[in-house]
Amino acid sequence: MQEKKSIFKHPELGEITVIRKPRAKRITLRVRGGCITATLPYICPIRLLEEIIDNNCERLKEEVAGTRLRIIDWDFTLKGPCFYLKLQQSNNEDIQITGKDGVYILSCPASANFSNSDTQEQLRDAIKTALRHRAKLIIPKRLAQLATQHNIKYSNVSVRDSHSRWGSCSTRGSISLSIYLVLLPIELIDYVLRHELCHTVHMDHSPQFWALLDKFCGTSSKELREQLKSYHTGF
Ligand SMILES: [Zn+2]
C-alpha cells in the first residue's frame, strides 16, 4: 500500500493536507510554513481528524499564524546561535549571497520589488543556499563529535533541504539531517542529532529508545522534544 494524499477543508483553518500512511498508527498534526499537514492511519474515519482539529482549533490557528512565511524585505534578518543573515543594498542587478563563519549577507539591488512573488522566491532560494552552506559545515561535524562522545557508529550522514523532518535514520544507520537545523538553539540541534544516533541502536520509539536518549541528553529528552515541537525558526 502506498501513501495517499488529499485535501480536507476546515471552515476556520482552511485547507489541510491529509496523508494516509499504511504504517501510521495514530493521527498526527504538523504545522509548517503556515500550512497544516495531518498524517492518518490508512483506515481511519475523517471524523476523528475533524474532532482533533476542533479540539485544538485555537492552538492550531496560533501555530499557523506563527509559522506563516514571512515577507522578506530590507528589515528581514535570520538570527540563531550559529547562523546570522541580513539584507544589504547593492549596485548589482541580481540577488547575491555571500558569507562565512555563519554570517551571511544577502545583497539585493536597491530597486528590488519585495511584493513580487518571483523576487520572494529568489530571496528564499538564496537564503536556502546559505542555510545549506552553513549546515554542511557544522552539522556533520557535530554529529561525529556526539557519536564519539556516546560511542555510537553510523554508516553515513547527509544534509538535505527537508522542511518536514529535522532528521531521519535508515535501518542501515544512514542519518539524514535538515539544513534548517542551523536555525535552532544549540541544545535543540544536539537533541535532534542524539535522537537520530539513538535510532542506530533502536529503530523504534520504544521505552528503551527514550531511556537511551534521556541518558545521552543527560536530562529528560521529553522536555527537549516539547521545546522542539513549539519552536518556530522564523523561516
Ligand atoms: Zn525518531
Image (tube, helix red, strand yellow):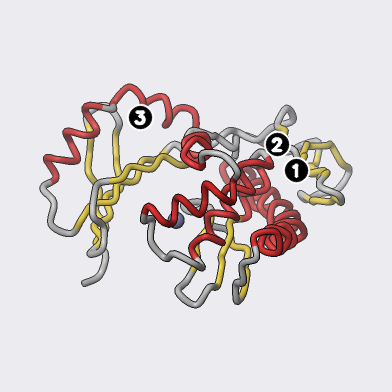
Q: Quadrant of residue 77?
A: top right
Question: Mark 1 near mark 2, Cβ–Cβ under 8 Å?
Answer: yes
Q: Earlier in the sequence, mark 3 or mark 1?
A: 3
The CB of the residue at mark 3 lies under 8 Å from ligand 1: no
Residue 83: give its label: 1
Q: Callout 3, which amino acid?
A: Leu
Looking at the image, the residue that sits furthest to the top is: 58
> Which quadrant is the N terminus positioned in?
bottom left
Q: Earlier in the sequence, mark 1 or mark 2?
A: 2
Q: Is residue 220 above or below residue 18?
A: above
Q: Quadrant of residue 103?
A: top right
In the depicted view, which residue is nearer to us: 163 or 223?
223
Residue 60: give its label: 3
Residue beneath the point at 63% across and 47% down: 189
Q: Tell me if 142 is positioned left or right of 47 in this view.
A: right
Residue beneath the point at 62% across and 71% down: 153
In the depicted view, which residue is nearer to us: 53 or 195?
195
Q: CA distance from mark 3 to mark 2?
A: 24 Å
Q: Which residue is mark 2?
A: 78
Q: Tell me if 158 is positioned left or right of 228 in this view.
A: right
